[in-house]
Amino acid sequence: MSGQLIFTPCPGTKDTSVSEALATLRDAGAVALVTLMPEEELLQNEVDLLPEECQLQGIEWFHLPVEDDQAPGEAFSTAWEANRDRLKELVNGGQKIAIHCKGGSGRTGLIAAQLLIECGMSMREAVAQVQALRPRAIQHPAHINYISQFDKKSPNAR
């Protein structure tokens, strides 16, 4: 894997505007943003214009919704299947991808680990790398149970 994953809180929620936060990510080299917050959560946090802001800044936007403190469900699975190959292409092509949920740890760490596994890393190594950056990531029982399904499976099993 030659790309990089950037873990970030939701752009526009930490005393900066969405456009300022995206400009910072773009300046850090991010070419894509993976949003894990469902639509309702984006609306509640007044960041529902993320797709438009990404387009204005030349950042490719992916919406892979996961409810807070839950394992990924049907909406995530559908979006993952539609976008997995493109995300892997970006990572394997040496690009930087920013991933966020609300705070940048729980769901972010979980899906970052899944992407690392999809790119060929073992489940244990992926979890260890994520937790080295975000020690509280992949601690929720639903997240542990979800990521455990990738243990000892081939990277393309899911």
Image: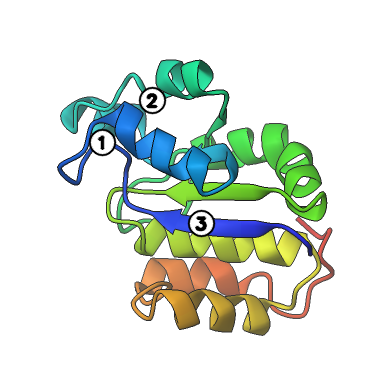
Q: Cβ–Cβ below 8 Å for labels 2 and 1? A: yes
Front position in the image: 17 or 117: 17
Say which label, 2 or 3, has the lower sequence index.
3
**In the image, residue 43 lies at what x, y percent?**
23, 25
Which quadrant, please, contains the N terminus? bottom right
Front position in the image: 80 or 10: 10
Question: Between marks 2 and 3, how big is the CA–CA gap?
Answer: 17 Å
Write the residue at 81% across / 68% down.
120
Which quadrant, please, contains the C terminus? bottom right
Q: Say which residue label 3 marks.
A: 6
Say which label, 3 or 1, has the lower sequence index.
3
Front position in the image: 129 or 73: 129
Residue type pointed to by label 3: Ile
Q: Say which residue label 2 marks.
A: 50
Question: Between marks 2 and 1, how big is the CA–CA gap?
Answer: 9 Å
Question: Between marks 3 and 1, how big is the CA–CA gap?
Answer: 16 Å
**In the image, residue 123 lies at what x, y percent?**
67, 77
Q: Quadrant of residue 11?
A: top left
Q: Is residue 135 above or below residue 149?
A: below
**Residue closest to the far front:** 27
Examine the rendering and report whether any part of residue 72 can be seen: yes
Q: Say which residue label 1 marks.
A: 12
Residue type pointed to by label 2: Leu
